[in-house]
Image (cartoon, rainbow, N blue to C red):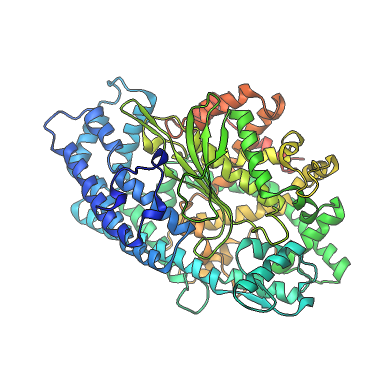
């Protein structure tokens, strides 16, 4: 039997990455599915009357071996994949989809859950137990338990096809990201670029035994080039390359995958009795309906659009003034915005970066979480890593008791997808009197250290680290009974609250003084730079808001209507972007073909949740600001009512327990400077 199928004999039961061969995964999954099915059989074969304990609790703790293997495999498939691993993923996805359907369409199991659910008001259950029971019952119904045999069969085939198509979508995006390079050999083409970006590009070229400099579509390479490179034609080339990922006439084209995914999702929703996929998804969200999401997005659009148009006019006039440019294209936006920002605030990332050495910023996140929640982080070497760049930490609480394991993986590499995310290798839960503590990971793509410099972060990367660390705290401080309700297992439009609220500390003098120290001199960041960071926080906020709203509206466009007559992806996108478009369209580019959040991640009909959570986070941080950003009493209320509770109760109930009232958009609009 594979090491994957037994409890790990490692410190805190951490994943033994080095001991796992790729060839072990498929048989390990097959065995874990057999074992999980046997656990379900034990529940359905009992002659005892269905109770919460012998049905719901037994179900809550079933399939944990399968979860453990899935967590390891799919986390590595995002952070450290290979062609062989992707091939295995394509084989495993249909197996897992079939198993998931076997559970959700198991008539005997459903009847037992239903029997307990029908007694919910007479049973002596805790809030968490009631949530588990309701969630399980609804999950069965939402996954086809009430369908006819023929409909169940169709549901199975839809789910299998969705699983493999989403995987393929992601593989295509990754391949397109890595298949492009901008290889420069003329030093004059580097004009305007920061020294760090040039050094990184030189290193990339040397690694491939090439002369000159290589720039890629990985963010730490792409963003500085688009922001600082004076050569407009090269910015254009790179921008178009980024915008046509999986929208080219080659084997990695995602157009048919996108259309297939949205049509299958729509059919699935109809089969289950819902008008659209968005109606299906939003039933289990704070927003509750597409109408409410559209109304929310329109309300923000109304406030943001006038500001965005003024900002765009101002940027256009500025480009005309400094470079006699008649009209702005997409590859001009970041470049002239940065120049205007520098002129207005005398502030740019190159001034700030020396104060944001990665190691110091991470220590800052640790110190902020220590002051708020009493956590302590110690780097350890006795825990196996899946890559040498990964750092491992043992986390303890204020009493010195073990809290969690924390993995941090910060640099881009082949086999790692772009972006930043938090994930877990093991959830927190309690079983037989033992509190099983979580193994949490954050994965980012920051600039690697070079021969002459450590990894220095842009301010945007600083907030990204704090954002993902906020998600990590949600996982680490979990204190629930059942794994499916633990940590970040919450409504999707609530999950961004802990992450987004953490970003606020990056703008506060009291917090910045803890970690923003010059990497060469050790000097704490000067107060005038802190003031400029705060002052510039709302720079082009209207345009930034419009951009986020455009993504949310595209997402709802795909999922809140009947997509069956959409045949041209590009035309459809243009119609969705009409109310938010500032820059001229680029005919070679499309957004959806690389929109991994909604076609590979879990954000379908949920991209609006970033803005929704901003309302929550602005309201939350306003509470801290009124009482002190390190106020222990409020931090404790946030920990006890939000971070530790996971999905044990309705998020609005949890939020009101913490804050005393429902959130309103005022704090967000005020913070964004959009409230006149």
| Extreme residue toward the front, this view | 382
- Comparing 69 with 304, the one in front is 69
Q: Quadrant of residue 168?
A: bottom left
Q: In the rendered image, is residue 136 in sight?
A: yes
Question: What residue is shown at x 54% (from left), y 28% (from top)?
Answer: 639
Q: Is residue 136 left or right of residue 365?
A: left
The answer to whether residue 158 is seen in the rendering is no
Left or right? Give the position of 201 relative to 145.
right
Residue 627 percent across, percent down from the top left: 70, 24
Residue 216 falls in which quadrant of the image?
bottom right
Which of these two is toward me, 506 or 157? 506
Identified at 53% across, 28% down, the residue is 397
Q: How many marks?
A: 0
Residue 584 lies, in percent from the top left, at 68, 69
On the rendered structure, is 168 left or right of 216?
left
Q: Residue at x 78, y 42 (%)?
A: 534
Q: Nearer the viewer, residue 169 or 443?
A: 443
> In the figure, 329 relative to 304: above or below?
below
In the picture, which quadrant includes the C terminus? top right
Q: Tell me: residue 626, above or below residue 93.
A: above
Q: Is residue 194 above or below residue 208?
A: above
**Residue 66 location in percent, x, y?**
31, 48
Question: Which residue occupies the foreground of this view, 294 or 620?
Answer: 620
Give me the residue at 41% from left, 38% from top: 12
* Residue 182: percent from left, percent from top: 65, 75
Residue 10, by quadrant, is: top left
């Amino acid at each position: 039997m594979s090491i994957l199928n037994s409890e790990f004999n490692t410190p805190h039961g951490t994943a033994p990455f080095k001991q796992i061969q790729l060839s072990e995964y498929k048989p390990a999954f097959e065995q874990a599915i057999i074992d999980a099915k046997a656990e379900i059989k034990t529940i359905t074969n009992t002659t005892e009357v269905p109770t919460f304990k012998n049905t719901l609790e037994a179900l809550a703790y079933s399939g944990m071996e399968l979860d453990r293997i899935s967590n390891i495999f799919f986390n590595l498939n995002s952070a450290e994949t290979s062609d062989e691993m992707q091939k295995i993923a394509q084989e495993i996805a249909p197996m897992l989809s079939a198993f998931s359907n076997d559970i959700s369409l198991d008539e005997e199991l459903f009847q037992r859950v239903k029997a307990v659910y029908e007694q919910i008001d007479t049973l002596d259950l805790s809030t968490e137990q009631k949530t588990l029971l309701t969630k399980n019952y609804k999950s069965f119904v939402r996954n086809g338990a009430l369908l006819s045999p023929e409909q169940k069969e169709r549901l199975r085939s839809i789910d299998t096809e969705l699983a493999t198509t989403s995987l393929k979508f992601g593989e295509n995006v990754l391949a397109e990201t890595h298949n492009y390079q901008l290889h420069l050999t003329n030093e004059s083409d580097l004009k305007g670029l920061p020294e760090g970006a040039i050094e990184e590009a030189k290193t990339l070229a040397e690694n491939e035994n090439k002369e000159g400099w290589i720039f890629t579509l990985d963010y730490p390479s792409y963003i500085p080039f688009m922001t600082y490179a004076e050569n407009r034609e090269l910015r254009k080339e790179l921008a178009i390359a980024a915008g046509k990922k999986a929208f080219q006439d080659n084997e990695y084209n995602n157009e048919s995958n996108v259309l297939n995914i949205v049509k299958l999702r729509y059919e699935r929703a109809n089969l289950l009795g819902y008008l659209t996929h968005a109606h299906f998804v939003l039933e289990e969200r704070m927003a509750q309906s597409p109408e409410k999401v559209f109304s929310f997005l329109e309300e923000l659009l109304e406030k943001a659009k006038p500001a965005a148009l003024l900002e765009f006019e101002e940027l256009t006039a500025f480009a005309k003034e400094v470079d006699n440019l008649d009209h702005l294209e997409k590859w001009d936006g970041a470049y002239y915005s940065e120049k205007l920002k520098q002129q207005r605030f005398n502030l740019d990332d190159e001034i700030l970066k020396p104060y944001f050495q990665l190691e110091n910023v991470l220590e800052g996140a640790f110190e902020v979480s220590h002051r708020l929640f009493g956590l302590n982080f110690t780097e350890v070497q006795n825990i196996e890593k899946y890559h040498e760049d990964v750092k491992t930490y043992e986390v303890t609480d204020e009493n010195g008791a073990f809290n969690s394991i924390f993995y941090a993986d910060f640099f881009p590499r082949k086999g790692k997808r772009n972006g930043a995310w938090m994930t877990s290798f093991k959830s927190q839960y309690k079983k037989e009197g033992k509190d099983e503590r979580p193994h949490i990971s954050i994965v980012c793509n920051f600039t690697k250290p070079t021969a002459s410099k450590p990894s220095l972060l842009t301010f945007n990367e600083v907030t990204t680290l704090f954002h993902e660390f906020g998600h990590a705290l949600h996982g680490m401080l979990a204190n629930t009974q059942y794994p499916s309700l633990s940590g970040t297992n919450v409504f999707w439009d609530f999950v961004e609250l802990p992450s987004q609220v953490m970003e606020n500390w990056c703008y506060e003098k009291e917090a910045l003084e803890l970690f923003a120290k010059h990497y060469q001199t050790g000097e704490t960041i000067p107060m005038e730079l802190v003031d400029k960071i705060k002052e510039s926080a709302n720079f082009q906020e209207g345009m930034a808001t419009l951009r986020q709203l455009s993504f949310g509206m595209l997402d709802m466009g795909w999922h809140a209507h009947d997509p069956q007559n959409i045949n041209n992806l590009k035309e459809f996108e243009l119609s969705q972007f009409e109310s938010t478009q500032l820059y001229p369209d680029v005919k070679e580019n499309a957004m959806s073909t690389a929109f991994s959040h909604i076609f590979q991640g879990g954000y379908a009909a949920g991209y609006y949740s970033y803005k929704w959570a901003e309302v929550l986070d602005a309201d939350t941080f306003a509470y801290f600001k009124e009482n002190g950003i390190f106020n222990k009493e409020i931090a404790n209320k946030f920990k006890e009512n939000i971070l530790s509770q996971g999905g044990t109760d309705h998020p609005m109930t949890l939020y009101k327990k913490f804050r005393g009232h429902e959130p309103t958009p005022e704090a967000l609009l005020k913070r964004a400077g959009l409230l006149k």
